[in-house]
Image (tube, rainbow, N blue to C red):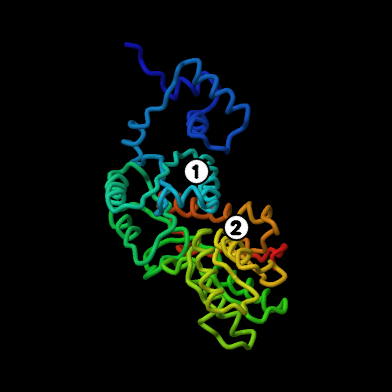
Amino acid sequence: MTQRATLEEVAARAGVSRATASRVLRGATNVSEAARAAVHAAAHEVSYSPNRAARSLVTGRSDSIAFMVDETEERMFADPFFLGMLRSVQVATAAAGLQLVFTVVSRAEDRERFVAYAAGGHVDGVLLLSLHGTDDLPHRLEAEGVPTVLSGRPFDDARGLFYVDADNVGGGRIATAHLVDSGRRVVATVTGALDMCAGQDRLTGYRQAVTASGATLDESLVEPAGFTTAEGYAATERLLARRPDVDAIFAGSDLAAFGAIRALHAAGRRVPDDVAVVGFDDIRDAAEHQPPLSTVRQPVGALGSAMTRMLLARVTGAVPDPNVVLPVELVVRGTG
């Protein structure tokens, strides 16, 4: 039987230290290009393959983290926000020399299987996106000893949980204030999903801006919806049936804003002449929409990177700031 080549052999052949060879083969970026090329060439020459099982026995780690989305596959792949987050997390994970395990769960049995998988030591930690309602999934993972970082503030008690969020309250406030300041008099909102803090917080920002303008809050101008185009369309139809005098809409997401604009066009309303619309997210399609969508930009790349850094710090035993909120900005384009 041919003896497996060792990391020491690779390092010696490449003329680098064992530590440098290890960093290169784990995909770390803090090595020179010359060293990287030499190590890869040496590994190829001796047919080296890393023994992950042996390394896990020594370190007690799998060198893998999970990217988990608590949504249906249809929603996951239809919403550019999730894909943007996945892209940024993958870059940060690869830079750290780790593997990324991607999973989408929407059924109870999927969740149970994943909790067992994570608790079994197959991943060192979990990045959890799109938590709904009072879901106890992050608490269960933490109870099993699996460090978990959430995308967004949890809906219920956040004690003991780590999360990275965008300033959703501030974003709802600046979007609504912009509509008011531009001369719109009947400013409504088609909300995001209200079983999620992002939807609740953006609605809070809307209410704060209306109150700050001196107007009285009118709940007939608040139409519960969700983050999808179909939900934005249906909610706008309901809103127009009840309040045909609406002249501005703050939508809880860009996709919902697209649905709102379609519903307005179907009702014979011009955007932005008759009704101005502002969304939230600034997905790539926002700038390419006709007319280009005014929106609140949240830093998707920075959110994913910050989540990954927080999780990796926890995995290595550090205690980072458990709650990080990143700023957002208003991007004014052609819809209002």
Is residue 71 visible in this depiction of the protein? yes
Mark 1, residue position:
93
Crowdedness of circle 1 by 10 Å Cα count: few (<14), some, many (20+)?
Answer: many
- Describe the element under mark 2 as helix, strand or loop: loop
Drawn side of residue 107 relative to residue 249, left or right: left
Sequence order check: which comes first, mark 2 or mark 1? 1
Q: Nearer the viewer, residue 245 or 13?
A: 245
Is residue 327 visible in this depiction of the protein? no
Q: Position of residue 170 (x, y in %)?
A: 59, 72
Quarter that holds the N terminus:
top left
Q: Which mark is residue 299?
A: 2
Q: Quadrant of residue 208?
A: bottom right
Crowdedness of circle 2 by 10 Å Cα count: few (<14), some, many (20+)?
Answer: some
Judge whether 186 appears above or below 197 on screen: below
- Describe the element under mark 1 as helix, strand or loop: helix
Q: Which mark is residue 304?
A: none
Q: Nearer the viewer, residue 327 or 297?
A: 297
Q: Position of residue 326 (x, y in %)?
A: 57, 63
x 52%, y 76%: residue: 222
Q: Nearer the viewer, mark 2 or mark 1?
A: 2
Quarter that holds the C terminus:
bottom right
x 46%, y 20%: residue: 9
| Type of the residue with mark 2 | Pro
Residue extending farthest top: 1
Q: Quadrant of residue 174?
A: bottom right
Alpha carbon separation for disc pair 2 and 1: 18 Å
Q: Position of residue 293 (x, y in %)?
A: 67, 61
Q: Position of residue 281 (x, y in %)?
A: 59, 60
| Type of the residue with mark 1 | Thr
